[in-house]
Amino acid sequence: MSKGISRRGAMRAGAGVLATGALGAPMVHAQGSGGNLRFAFWDHWVPGSNDAIRQLGARWAERNRVNLTLDFINTTGNQLQLTAAAQAQSRSGHDGISLVPWDVGAYADQLEPVDDVIGRLVAKYGAINPVAEFLCRRNNAWRAIPATSGTQNKPALCRFDLLQRHAGIDVRAMWPARNEKGPGADTWNWDTFLMAAERCHAAGVPFGLPMGQFTDAVDWVGGLFASYGARITDERGNPTIRNNPQLRQVMEYAVRLARFLPNDVWAWDDASNNRALISGRSALVFNPPSAWTVAKRDAPQVAENCWTIPMPAGPQGRFLAYLPFNTGIWAFGRNKTAAKSFLEFLSERESAEFTTNFSGGYDIPPFASMSDFAVWTREGPPVGTIFNYPLKAHHDARPSIAFAPAPAELASQMYIQALNTKVIARVAQGGESIDAALGWLEREVNNMRRGG
Amino acid sequence: MAEGTSLALPRNDVPEGASLKRFARRRSTIAFLMTVPLMAVIGGLVIWPAAYAIWLSTLNRRMTQFIGLGNFEILLDSETFRMVIFQSIFFAVTAVILKALIGFWLAHMLHHLPTKGQRKWRGMLLVPWVIPPALSTLGWWWMFEPSYSSINWILAIFAVPAVPWLGDPWWARISVIIVNVWYGAPFFMIMYLAALKSVPEQLYEAAAIDGATSWQRLRYVTLPMMRNIISITVLFSLIVTFANYDIVRVLTNGGPRDLTHVFASYAFQVGVLAGNIPRGAAVSLFMFPLLAVIAFFVLRGVNRRSREEM
C-alpha cells in the first residue's frame, strides 16, 4: 500500500484530471444553455446606480442560465442615441437597448412588439404611465418597455426657506410628506408662481428656469404649455397654432415670467439649473432630486432647506414633466424570448424598487401603483424632502411630455429643436411680437412635416 | 530604363504560360498594384461615405422613397436653415480672416526673434493647436459659463458689468469665433513662418538698396512670395472651419435660438438627434458645391503660379 505513485499512475491520474476539466469546462458557462443576451443600458449618472441593473441581471441570468452581457452607454455627446442609430442602420448589435423618449417611435419598425410582456405587467401592477404608453405604443403594438432606471420626473425643487422668506409661501405646509394636500396647496398655480418668481428675483434669488435647447428647459416648458391646454399640433401632426387662444395665453404668461429669470437662461444647459440651486443663488428649479443629492454632498446647508413639490397648476390642470427611458428589443436580435423575459423581470415591483433605491429615489417606475416606495419617504435631510417627487394621487396631476400628442417622427424633431422654448425666446429675448413668433413656429412645424 | 520598358525576356525565349508573369512585371502593372491600397483607402473612407451621404440626402425621412433634391428645397424654405447658412458663412469667413491676420502677425514676430528664443515661443504658441479642441473648448466654456464666468469675475474687479457671453446672440457668436481663432491661428502661424523662412534674403537686400520702406518690402516682396502658401492655407482653413462641429456643440449647442449653429452642428441635430437622417445629410452637403468651386479656382491659381515660377 505504501508503494507510492508510479509514473504510469501519475500520468493516468493527470489524464483523468485533464479529461474531467475538459468535460467540466462548459459547465463553467452553464448559464449559457439559455443562449447569449447582450443589452445596452443608459449609463446612469447617479453613482452606483448601474450596480442595481448589474445585480438584477446577474440574478436573472443565473436563474435562466443565460450568458448575459450588459453595456452601459452614457448620453454625454449623445453616445447612446448614436449607438441606437448605428445599430438600426446596420441591423446588428445588442439584443436590446435603452432608448430616449422619441427613439421608440423613430425605430418602431425595427423593434420587437412586447404586448405580451406589457399585458402581464399591467395585469399585475395596474395602469401604466400614459406618457410612456404614448411614446411606446406605435403601429398598434407596444414597441418598448418603459424603464425604471433613468426615468425621471421634473417637479419643483424648492428652497423652502427662501420661498417662505421672500414670497411668503410655506411649501412644506402645502405639500407635506404625507399622502394629502396641506393648506394652500390648491393655490399653487402659475399665478402664484409668477408672484413668487417676481419676489425672489427682486430678492436676488431668481428661479433657475432654463430656457435653452436642453431637455430640462423643453420639459418644464412642456408642462407649462400642457397646463394651459396649449397644443402646437394635433394627433395627426397638423399645426394648431393659428387662432389658438391657449397658445397665445401661455405665450403671454411665459414672456412675463421670463422677465424675472436670470438674463442668461437662454444659454442654460441641463446642469445650469442644478448649479443655480446648489450655489444658493436660486430659490426654485424644476428638476429630479439629483440637484439635491449633489447639494447634500457639496452644500449641505442648501440641501437641508430643499423640498420637492408638484409643478403649479394652470387653467387646464396640473401637469408633471416626465422624461422616461424605454428599453426596446431589436427585431433583428437573436434571443428575443430571453430578452423579453429579462425586461419583464426588471419591471417587476421588487426589481423596480431595488433600482430606485440604488439611485437614491431618482428613478421613477412606470406604474402609478409603485409610487409608494419607502425610499421617497425616508430620504433626507430634511426627511420627506422627495416624498412628493413621484406623481401621487393627491397631487391631482397628470404626467406630460412636451409636444404630445404629435406623432413621434414630428414630435422628436420639435423636441430636439426645442421649438417651445425658442418661440418664447423670440419674443422675450428677440423682441418679436407674439404673432410673428407664432407665425415662425407654424412655418417651422410645416417644414418639419414635409419630405415624410 | 526607358519608360514602359518590360523587364521580361524576349518573347521567343519565354516559355509557354509566362505572359502573366511578364504582365505582372510591367512597370505600369507594378505601379497600379502599389497604388491599390491607397485607392482602397480613398474609395472606402472618402468616396463611398460621400456617395452614401449624397444618396441619403435624396431620400425621404423614412428613407423609403427617392425625393431628389426635395430635402434641399425644404431646407431653403426654412428660416432657421437660412439663418444657419448666414451664421456658417459669417463664422467661417470672420474666423479665417482673423486667423490669417493673427497668424501672419505672429509669424512675423517669431521670424524676427533670435533663433534660440524663437524655438521656445514657437512651441508655446502652438499649444492651442495641439490640445484636442473638444477639451480646450470645454476650458473656454468654463470661462464663458453663463452663471459663473471667470472672465466676468475678472471684469467685475474692474467694475465692468458682466457679459452674457453665451446667452446673448451676438456675444455667443463672438465667443464661438474667439475660440475658433484661438485654436486655429497657430496653424496659420506655423505655415506662414515656414513660408517666411523660404523667402530669399537677397530679395530684401535688393529692396533695401532700392530704398523700399518696410511696408513696401511686405507688399512687394513678402506677400508675392507667400501667395501660394496663403491661398492654400486659407482654402484649407475655410473648408475645416465650415465643417467645424465641436466648438459650437460644446460651447453653445447652437443656441440661443439657433443663432450660433453651423452646418455640422445643425446637421447633427437634424439628422441624428431628431432622427431625420436624409435631411441631416442634406444640411452637411449644402456647402459642398460652393467649397468645391472655391477649391477648384484657388488650386488652379496656385498651379498656374507654380508653373510660372518654374
Image: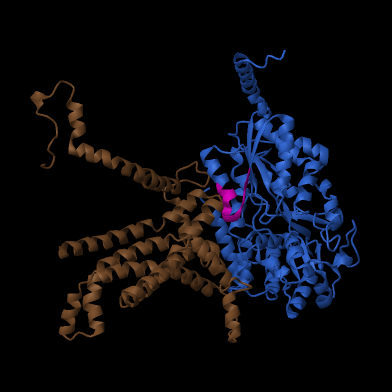
Q: Position of residue B45 (x, y in %)?
A: 39, 46
- Is A76 in the magenta? yes
Residue B239 is left or right of residue A285, and the answer is left
Residue A215 is left or right of residue B310, and the answer is right
Q: Is residue B147 visible?
A: yes
Residue B50 is left or right of residue A399, and the answer is left
Q: Position of residue B293 (x, y in %)?
A: 31, 59
Residue B93 lies, with reference to residue A126, above or below; the image says below
- Is A344 in the magenta? no
- What shade does chain B have? brown
Query: Can you tell which quarter of the image residue A161 is in?
Result: bottom right
Which quarter of the rendered picture does the N terminus of chain B lie within? top left
Q: Which residues are magenta?
A: A71-82
Which quarter of the rendered picture does the C terminus of chain B lie within? bottom left
Residue A193 lies, with reference to residue A350, above or below; the image says below
Query: Can you tell which quarter of the image residue B165 is in?
Result: bottom right
Q: Position of residue A106 (x, y in %)?
A: 59, 45
Foreground residue among A209 and A192? A209
Kindly identify the residue that appears in the image at 75 percent across and 63 percent down: A297
Residue A201 is left or right of residue A242, and the answer is right
Chain identifier of the blue chain:
A
Kindly identify the residue that appears in the image at 48 percent across and 49 percent down: B278
Q: Position of residue B179 (x, y in %)?
A: 48, 69
